[in-house]
């Protein structure tokens, strides 16, 4: 699956979607400080390569990163400490470091937000290419943050967001998040309660644990979209993006055969083109010859921006630790932290009336026992 993620994320299709910005909008003028993606790192132990390696490429800030990385990381956040195990979303709080990152890297200021939100709202009304279920400032802001406050690109993103929903209603409409428990029970995907030192959430996939004979890849898409929608409720996640770890231990040709062009297109949409969540880094573990064979075919199609976000570690956990310290990783990956099953997140977040209201507004089916929290608000 990662071959398709990497391939289509850098494909001509995506370039055509992102490469035709009309100059002159407030987003173009006011967000000109946004920078290009960083160079690809190397895991070589030589001194010359060490001088070019971004130890922070997947998460943390490196002392020498400013010399080689055009997109500096936020400094280690006080709220991202090893004892942070609370199963809750920060719906309001944004650390000062994240705000500074937004100002420096996204071009976000009060003036920019005010002007670009107005421009984006007017553009949506004037062009009529989509019918958002919300048009409030907070909702539009997530699309502007994802595109560095470029109004034209943010508009294309929100149009693709709703187009994706219209084309794939089966993965979000009338879906009961509680009924997705089997994805967690089979340990296919998880989101740790704790963040990386820089405040980013991690999503971990263990595709080798998935048995395609039990349920289709559509089920994994359903769970992924639920997690992404929940993550988008955090302003900090809108600013910093997230990190994905793909553990490919145990992957077989059975898994490879399930990947179709349609699946690849859906992966592209979620990872790059149609969702207002930035993928900051992709870490690939335990890749086998099956993955290597697939990846070699598509590697020429990966552009430099996406290539700079992909890191291969094999079974070398120390390589992963150069990006995410072990204090912020599960024990399975040489870390010190515990993991939580998928259903614990759903149970916990169901107690927050604002989360319940948001998920119902997106078309999800919320069980009566959870809806009661919303009615009690």
Image (spheres, rainbow, N blue to C red):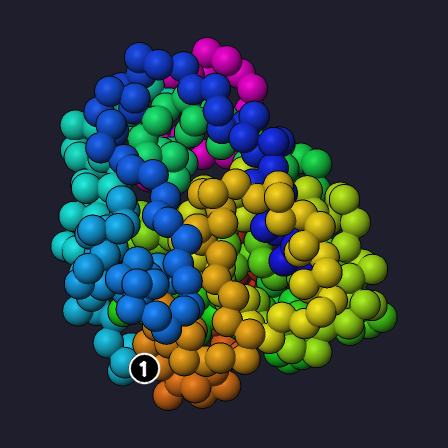
The image quarter containing residue 210 is bottom right
Magenta region includes residue 221? no
The magenta region covers 122-138
- Tell me where residue 351 appears, x and y as whole percent: 42, 68
Residue at 19%, 41% in the rendered image: 103
Residue 351 vs residue 56: left or right?
Answer: right
Which quadrant is the C terminus positioned in?
bottom left
Residue 26 vs residue 4: left or right?
Answer: left
Residue 111 vs residue 230: left or right?
Answer: left
Label total for image: 1
Residue at 62%, 70% in the rendered image: 287
Residue 372 is at least partly visible in this image = no
Residue under label 1: 327
- Tell me where residue 102 appears, x and y as whole percent: 23, 44
Residue at 22%, 63% in the rendered image: 62
Which quadrant is the N terminus positioned in?
bottom right
Q: In terms of depth relative to the viewer, which is nearer, 321 or 148?
A: 321
For the residue labelled by badge 1, is the local secondary structure a helix, a strand or a loop? helix
Residue at 83%, 68% in the rendered image: 254
The image quarter containing residue 138 is top left
Q: In terms of depth relative to the viewer, which is nearer, 27 or 234?
A: 27
- The answer to whether residue 291 is above or below residue 276 is below
């Amino acid at each position: 699956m990662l071959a398709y993620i990497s391939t289509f994320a850098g494909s001509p299709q995506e370039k055509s979607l992102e490469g035709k910005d009309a100059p002159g909008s407030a987003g173009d003028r006011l967000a000109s400080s946004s920078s290009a993606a960083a160079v690809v790192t190397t895991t070589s132990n030589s001194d010359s390569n060490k001088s070019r390696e971004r130890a922070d490429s997947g998460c943390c800030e490196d002392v020498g990163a400013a010399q080689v990385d055009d997109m500096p990381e936020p400094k280690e956040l006080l709220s991202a400490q090893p004892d942070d195990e609370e199963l809750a979303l920060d719906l309001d709080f944004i650390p000062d470091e994240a705000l500074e990152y937004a100002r420096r890297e996204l071009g976000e200021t009060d003036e920019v937000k005010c002007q670009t939100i107005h421009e984006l709202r007017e553009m949506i009304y004037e062009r009529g290419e989509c019918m958002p279920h919300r048009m409030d400032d907070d909702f539009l802001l997530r699309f502007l943050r994802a595109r560095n406050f470029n109004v034209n690109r943010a508009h294309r993103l929100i149009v693709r967001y709703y187009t994706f929903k219209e084309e794939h209603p089966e993965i979000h409409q009338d879906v009961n998040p509680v009924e997705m428990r089997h994805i967690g029970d089979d340990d296919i995907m998880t989101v740790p309660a704790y963040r990386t030192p820089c405040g980013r959430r991690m999503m971990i996939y263990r595709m080798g644990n998935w048995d395609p004979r039990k349920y289709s890849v559509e089920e994994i898409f359903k769970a992924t979209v639920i997690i992404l929608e929940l993550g988008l409720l955090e302003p900090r996640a809108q600013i910093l993006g997230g990190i994905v770890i793909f553990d490919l231990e145990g992957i077989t040709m059975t898994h490879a055969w399930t990947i179709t062009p349609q699946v690849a297109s859906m992966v592209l949409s979620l990872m790059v083109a149609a969702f207002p969540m930035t993928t900051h880094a992709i870490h690939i573990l335990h890749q086998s010859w099956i993955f290597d064979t697939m990846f070699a075919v598509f590697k020429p199609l990966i552009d430099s921006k996406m290539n700079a976000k992909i890191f291969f570690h094999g079974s070398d956990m120390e390589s992963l630790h150069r990006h995410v310290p072990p204090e912020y990783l599960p024990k399975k990956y040489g870390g010190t932290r515990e993991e939580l099953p998928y259903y614990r997140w759903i149970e916990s977040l169901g107690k927050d009336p604002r989360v319940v209201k948001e998920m119902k507004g997106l078309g999800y089916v919320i069980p009566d026992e959870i809806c009661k929290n919303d009615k009690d608000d």
